[in-house]
Image: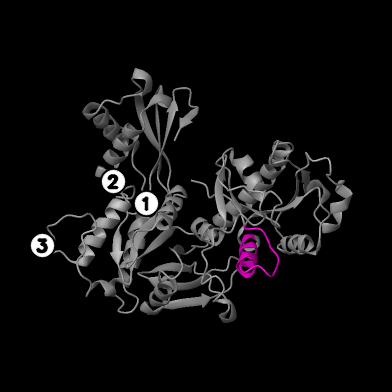
Amino acid sequence: MKNLPIVALIGQTNAGKSSILNRMARKNIAIVAREEGTTRDNVVATIDNRFILVDTAGLKDPSDDFEASIQEQISDAIDSADVILVTLDSSRYFNHRDARIAKDALKSGKPVFLLLNKCDLKESLPVEEFRALGVAPENIYYVSATTGAGINRFKESLNDSLRKVHSDKNNGRDREKSSGSSLKIALIGRPNVGKSSLFNALGKKQQAIVSSRQGTTRDVNRVFVKYKGRDLEILDTAGLRKPGKREVGIEKFSAIRTLAAIEESDICCLLVDSTEPHSKLDQSLAGQIVEAGKGIIMVVTKSDLLENAEPTNFFGEENIGNRTAADFLIDALEKDYDFLPYAPVVLTSSETGENVTQLFELALQIDEARHTEIKTSDLNKILGDAIVSHPPAGLKNTRPKPKYIVQTDVCPPWFVVHGREMELLHWSWKRFLERKVREKYPFIGTPIMFSFRNDNRDKIDK
């Protein structure tokens, strides 16, 4: 599965960034309103399965209480994105803040496009008024998020730029593979969930720390360790601010920084706070990890706090018996994350060091699972048994006919099922087939992907 490049929309408030995201995503993802500053956090959408588009919060007046954290989000976007879209209102002359945003974007050395939105308005200014911002003339586009004018033409140019980015990334990965690159493990989670504490514990736990460094281009802290002969690189996505700025936003969650770490990593440790296990944001992060095809470990932090906690039944059952608070917590996680039955759950404590080393063991097992290749004959036996035990039903009273299955990729393992009327195959049978594959090959901690194709080999569905 390819790693999707990240494209960031940056600019001042009310320039139309959210409307552009909605137009490109073909649905209303971002909240759009006439009031300036509606977007306070990053909004993310996958566009045409080609790239991830991030709408950052607009830059507001310094008197705004959120100004500092918003500027940090824009900095994150510039540091973490592969392509940057500077967005302006074409009916207004640019000011010093617009110039600063454009200058910072160009200093990154990454491809920069200038989107002059609201070109449908009669007040739209000529392009000469914006060339002083320094963006290459061929990368300046008039667009209208309202009418869609100019969007397709701009996307063609953007896709050309992304193809080059994708090629450069793949070449970089090939060089890493040839030089024996390390296994990258990212710590993912909400602010204050214990990422930095676990990061420090993982670094100190191993006797052979190769090196450590901070302040990379993606604002990710890293430590290199060696475990059982393997080089492991631990990525901490906490993105610690300078001491004088930590109070602003209280370690505010940044979607784009986390996205960049997920895309870069091989395996993600999703950290869940034992004192606050039910979190929609945690579940959303888990979905992003799975969608990216990365290995995943569910890491419960602060487990030492469960020792003296009263056993709590999260589901209202009366019979508690001899079960502990930890038992009920794991039950709750299994229910909240029923879409991740293959993800191992580990209770850890950075204070006591409980189960910290187990994360390294699991990482090696998951890495092996991600590289698993199954013989075509074995796969087709699984497919045949699945068809016999539960004949596939289709939509509209049809009977799709799967014929054979092959594995086409690893990291994550990807399987393609060929047959007739595959586009009508019911989603429940697709899940049934995945369960049958996992019964034989558990694929611990890794998603497995399926595509379904008709006999003419055109991909119909995923």
Question: Mark 3 or mark 2, which is nearer the start of the sequence?
Answer: 3
Quadrant position of the C terminus in the picture: top left
Q: Is residue 289 magenta?
A: no
Residue range highlighted in magenta: 57-77
Tell me the SS state at disc 1: loop
- Disc sitting over residue 366 in the figure: none
Residue 427, percent from left and from top: 36, 33
Q: Position of residue 167 (x, y in %)?
A: 62, 49
Q: Which residue is mark 1?
A: 446
Looking at the rendered structure, the secondary structure element under dot 2 is loop
Q: Name the residue located 29 percent from the left edge and 60 percent from the top edge.
A: 345
Say which residue label 2 marks: 441
Q: CA distance from mark 2 to mark 3?
A: 35 Å
| Mark 3 lies on residue | 321
Q: Identity of the amino acid at label 3?
A: Gly
| Of the image marks 3 and 1, the number of the one nearer the N terminus | 3
Label 1: how many residues lie within 10 Å, few (<14), some (14-19) or many (20+)?
many
